[in-house]
Amino acid sequence: MRRSGESEQGPPFAATDTEWWHQATFYQVYVRSFADFDGDGVGDLEGIHSRLGYLELLGVDALWLTPFFTSPMADHGYDVADPRDVDPVFGDLAGFDRLVADAHKHGIKVTIDLVPNHTSDLHPWFVEALESPPYSAARDRYIFRDGRAGGAQPPNNWVSVFGGPAWTRVADEQWYLHLFAPQQPDLNWADDEVRADLERTLRFWLDRGADGFRIDVAHGMAKPAELPDMDLRAVGVIGDHDFYDPRFDDDGVHDIHRMIRKVMDEYPGAMAVGEVWVTDNHRLANYLRSDELHLGFNFRLVLAEFDAAAVRTAIEESLRTAATADAPPAWTLSNHDVWREVSRYGGGEVGTRRARAMALVELALPGVVFVYNGEELGLPNVDLPDWALQDPMWERSGHTDRGRDNCRVPIPWEGDLPPFGFSPGDETWLPMPAEWAALTVERQLEDADSTLSLYRQAIELRKTHDAFAGDALEWYGAPEGCFAYRRKGGGLICALNMSDIAVPLPPGEVLLASGPLDEGYLPPDTAAWLV
Ligand code: GLC
């Protein structure tokens, strides 16, 4: 049993006119996988442009576009060779301008990914660094060091997030740091040119009409000057742990965020959300101080098991962080780096039922919600054959970690056969499963009970219904394995049943439910909204 009558006082996340994002529903477009216009099997900006009508129908307020900048694609665009141009695979700058202008006509804001922690190894700076001698200014834009043990051992014991050592040795025997793939050398944020260049990039896109940024690895960037060894027990642990990990969340990072914010403040209405994989409430709140990021993803819902107590704790802790920071919480259930929730919650029909329930839990919360493309279709992860895998994690882990391709398979739009309208060509960059014929946008738009219809209704209600007013929640007493919370301002009640038996619904009129209800009862794996 849960404690009853408890309240969670949230802060007044009151939005001014320029703070349009305070209750926004964002939609993450994984550009490679959303819609392919030119037929090469890879999604592109023109493809997104061609689907603006769909995005308006879905009701989202803003897009987050994953990197579409010039890139050799060692990490599918998170290895940037020119941060101020569009890779030809994705289109060109004129196409970006068209997309922004027309998205705005549809009432949709456009935010883009910024990758400040590292560049591509083919960025002109890194090419120059390799051609320059040790200790030169060109090397100082990155993190080059001499090795230990006479040079043969890496400078410290840091491990790459993608597996293997975080250091690679170059021809003259120095080593360079890469927290991700060797093709993604980490920048040295103590270097003035590195800072000046990011400022240029920010202005470049804001001047072109971008509404803001998602900042990649926003808890990376700064590293302690002496580069001390890490506690290797931190490797692969996501979420709470006390192991010393100087690779991330160094205090020096806040200075960089203040510099970014200063530029953004010159552009009223521009916002930045950070990818901050930090779970400690206070340390996460530090990123959200009034002169740093506007928003920081709270990944607690991604990390929580399908368990009422775990999900409730995730919500409470996230609200606590938001209250400490006086910033709206930024909720997410999935993205292009984690298992899709249908599969995470058990797969098949059970997984789908649970994912639908969690969608209502999330979309009833105060603050900002990020929906990952395909989530609104209830797409599961795909078991891809070895030959199809492209994520650098697969190679780097010595074929033990299959990586993230399984949550990045292209979106099925229409028709009965792959590529389901994703591409005018036959080939897609990852193969699409034939059974997705049942999950296409076309099919789901026609079906009032589909996951897409559920998302459309939920997003619409969230945007227009008075019951969603206010920022604070109170929790009801609820049977074991269940919870119910009420939005204190507007009065919306969200009830969730994660137990094995049907439980009585709280009193009220049902606005929306994630599955069929049973005469006043809430079945297992189901959530309902009531007023
Ligand atoms: C972030 C991105 C991920 C990428 C990594 C390196 O975690 O979300 O996709 O691989 O940064 O840029």
Image (spheres, rainbow, N blue to C red):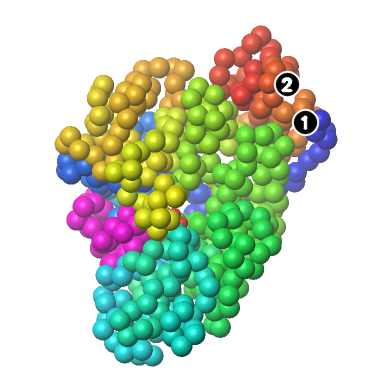
Q: Residues within 10 Å of mark 2 (few under 14, many from 20)?
A: many
Q: Is residue 404 magenta?
A: no
* Residue at horizontal 66 percent and vertical 9 percent from the top: 519
Q: Does residue 102 appear left or right of residue 401 in this picture? A: left
Badge 2 amino acid? Pro
Q: Which contiguous range is marked in magenta?
A: 69-98
Asked if labels 1 and 2 touch by Cβ distance under 8 angstroms, the answer is: yes
Q: Is residue 358 visible?
A: yes
* Residue placed most toward the observer, 366 or 309: 309
**Would you say the beta carbon of the disc 1 residue lies within 8 angstroms of ligand 1?**
no
Q: Residues within 10 Å of mark 1 (few under 14, many from 20)?
A: some
* Residue placed most toward the observer, 12 or 178: 178
Task: Give percent across and percent down for residue 72.
Answer: 26, 61
* Residue placed most toward the observer, 71 or 207: 71
Where ligand 1 lies, by quadrant? Answer: bottom left
* Residue at horizontal 17 percent and vertical 34 percent from the top: 426
Secondary structure under tag 1 reads loop
Q: Which mark is residue 498?
A: none
- Look at the picture and state if 509 lies above or below 441: above
* Residue at horizontal 40 percent and vertical 77 percent from the top: 176
* Residue placed most toward the observer, 284 or 180: 180
The outermost residue toward the top is 519
In the picture of the structure, the residue carrying the numbered disc 1 is 476
- Look at the picture and state if 421 lies above or below 372: above
Task: Give percent across and percent down for residue 3.
Answer: 83, 35
* Residue at horizontal 55 percent and vertical 56 percent from the top: 236
Task: Give percent across and percent down for residue 373.
Answer: 40, 39
Question: Where does the N terminus fall, quadrant-wise?
Answer: top right
- Quick one: label 2 or label 1, which is nearer the N terminus? 1
Question: Where does the C terminus fall, quadrant-wise?
Answer: top right
Task: Give percent across and percent down for residue 501.
Answer: 70, 18
In the picture of the structure, the residue carrying the numbered disc 2 is 506
